Image (tube, rainbow, N blue to C red):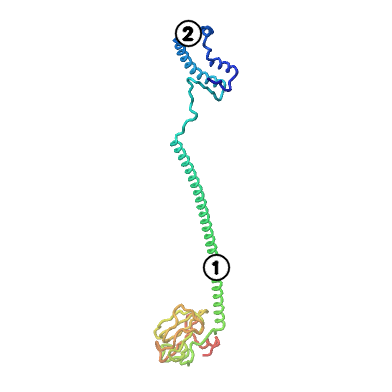
Amino acid sequence: MVGEPLGTTPAATRLWKALVSPHHDVSEAERATPRRSSGSRRVAKHRLTRRNTVRGVQLVGLTAALAAAAGTSAISISSTSNATTAPSSSSVNPSLESMTAARIERRQLASRDLSRFDLSLEAATKSSAAQLAAARAAKLSATATLTARRAIALQAAKEAAVAKAAAQAKAAAAAKAAAAAKAAAAPKVVLPTTGYHLTARFGQGGGRWAHNHTGLDFAAPIGTPIVSVMAGEVIQADFEGAYGRQVKVRHADGTVTSYSHMSEFTVSVGDSVAAGDQVGAIGVTGNTTGPHVHFEVLPGGGDPIDPEPWLREHGLNP
C-alpha cells in the first residue's frame, strides 16, 4: 500500500486518495456486472496488472510533483508490486578518502613549514639588524675615541710648541742678558798681548824699516796669544808682504787695529770678536828680526797714529 505524502495540504491529501484508490478507474456498470469465466478473469487480471504497473509509475512521478509543490521534506512510498527503494547512502571510495587525507596533511605540513620559515627569517632579520646596529655603535664609539685622542694629542702638541717657544724665548733673553752682562763686565780696551816688552815705538827710524816706524812692537815668545784690543769685526786675515801674517779688526767707532808677523790665525774674515778674544799668535813672519806683534791704530781705516796715546786715552799704559 502506498502511504500518504507527509506534510501535505488537505486538498493534496484528497487528490492523493483519489489517485491511489484501487477502484477509481472502474465504472459503476462494471462493478454491477457479474464476473465472467476464468478466461475472462485472466484477461482482466492481465489488463489490471498492466494498469497497475503504469499507475505505479505515474504515482511515483505525481508523488514527487506533489512533494515539490507542497514543500515536503520527505515522501514515504511503499508498493508491493513495483516499489523501488533508493540507496540510503552512497558508498565512499577508501582510496579517495586516503588521498584526500594525505593532501590535507601535506597542506598542514607545508603551512607549518612556511610558518617556521617565516619565524626563522624574522628572527634572522632581527639578529642581522641587531648585529648591524651593534657594529655601527662600535664604529661610532671607535671614531669618537680616535677623535678624542687626536684632540688630546693636538692640544698636547700645541702646549708643547708653546712651551718650547717660551723656553727658546727665555733662553734667548737669558743669552742676550748674559752677553750684555759680559760686555758690561769685560774691559772695553785691552793690550794686544801679555808677557811682552816694547822693542820699537811709533816714528822711530832705523835701517830695519823703509820709513819711520808706524806702530808699537810687543816682543814675546813665539806662540804667545794675540788678542783684539776692542770688540769688532775681522776684515782681514791674510799674508801681507813685509807684515807677514796680518789680521785687521774694524771697531764700532770706525777705528781699525792691525796685528802683524803672526805665526798663525785663529779667526777668519767676517768673524765678530770681543775685547780680549784671540785672533792669532806671535811669530816671525814677514820682515822681522825676532818674534813680536807689530800693533797699529788706524782711525777710520786711514793712516796710522801713535798707539801709546790712544791706549792711554782708553785707560791703558803700555
The label shown at residue 36 is: 2
Residue sitting farthest toward the right = 10
Name the one closer to the observer, 172 or 293: 172
Task: Tell whether 41 sits left or right of 17.
Answer: left
Question: Badge 2 local density, few (<14 within 10 Å), some, or many (20+)?
Answer: few
Residue sitting farthest toward the front = 37
**Of pointers 2 and 1, the one earlier in the residue sequence:** 2
Q: Is residue 232 above or below residue 140?
A: below
Question: Badge 1 local density, few (<14 within 10 Å), some, or many (20+)?
Answer: few
Please name which of the two marks, 2 or 1, marks the residue nearer to the observer: 2
Q: Quadrant of residue 167?
A: bottom right
Q: CA distance from mark 2 to mark 1?
A: 148 Å
Query: What is the x, y in percent for residue 116?
Result: 49, 47
Q: Residue at x 50, y 29 (%)?
A: 88
The residue under label 1 is: 156
The answer to whether the residue labelled 2 contacts the one labelled 1, judged by CB atoms less than 8 Å apart, is no
Query: What is the x, y in percent for residue 272?
Result: 49, 79
Q: Element under label 2?
A: loop
Under mark 2, the amino acid is Arg
The label shown at residue 311 is: none
Name the one closer to the observer, 290 or 264: 264
Q: Residue at x 39, y 84 (%)?
A: 241
Under mark 1, the amino acid is Ala
Query: What is the x, y in percent for residue 17?
Result: 56, 16
Query: What is the x, y in percent for residue 64?
Result: 52, 21
Name the one closer to the observer, 124 or 236: 124
Name the one closer to the observer, 233 or 225: 225
Q: Is residue 286 above or below residue 68?
A: below
Q: Element under label 1?
A: helix
